[in-house]
Image (cartoon, rainbow, N blue to C red):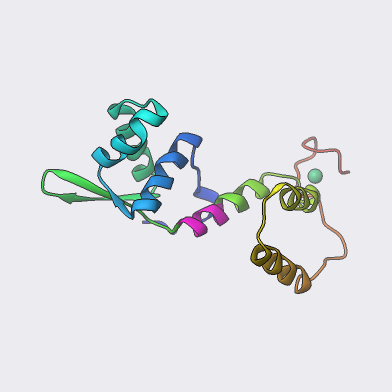
Amino acid sequence: MMETDSKNINITDAEWRIMRVIWALDTVTSRQLIDVLGDSMDWKPATIKTLLHRLTDKGIVKAEKDGNRFIYSAVMDESRTVDLASKKFFNQVCAKKVGSAVAYIIDESELTQDDIDKIQDKLNHKQAVEQINCNCVPGECDCN
Ligand SMILES: [Zn+2]
């Protein structure tokens, strides 16, 4: 399988719900997912199976046959997947606007002292660039 990177991390809102349960339980059967999410999300078993198939096709979930059923598990751990999905999001934004988006996220997030120490440490070691070149296709932004 191709190494998963931020370019092919493409997880829909519904698929994130499935992933959260898979990470929480390590391995799941579709039955377990139906038990956990069926009522709370008002999803039919067929919906959950479709979401699982899509995640497997995308290489985000792997399926192993166990008798007459499949055991599903995540290909990557949760924090790596969240990091790559965040990176993918920021790659879609004009490079000049990333800094203020990061500042906004920090402002809007609930953070522990540990989180703040970690972010502060990153900032202390961050090498500033002279200027950021807009990565946009002409017409995509008003930077120029
Ligand atoms: Zn731009």
Residue positioned most to the front: 113
Q: Viewer-proximal residue, 56 or 120? A: 120
**Residue at 81% over, 38% down:** 141
**Residue at 49% over, 37% down:** 12
Looking at the image, residue 36 sits to the left or right of residue 110; the answer is: left
Magenta segment, principal secondary structure?
helix
The location of residue 52, given as percent across then percent down, is 33, 39
Residue positioned most to the bottom: 125
- Rendered position, 120 above or below 103: below
The location of residue 31, given as percent across then percent down, is 24, 38
Residue positioned most to the left: 67
Q: How many marks?
A: 0
Quadrant placement of the C terminus = top right
- Rendered position, 64 above or below 57: below
Residue 69 drawn in magenta: no
- Rendered position, 121 above or below 103: below
Quadrant placement of the N terminus = bottom left
Residue stretch in magenta:
78-84
Looking at the image, residue 13 sits to the left or right of residue 75; the answer is: right
Query: Residue 55 falls in which quadrant of the image?
Result: top left
**Residue at 40% over, 49% down:** 60
Quadrant of the image where one finds ligand 1 = top right
**Residue at 40% over, 41% down:** 18
The location of residue 4, given as percent across then percent down, is 46, 56
Looking at the image, residue 100 sits to the left or right of residue 87; the answer is: right
Q: Viewer-proximal residue, 81 or 59? A: 81
Looking at the image, residue 123 sits to the left or right of residue 47; the answer is: right
The location of residue 132, given as percent across then percent down, is 83, 57
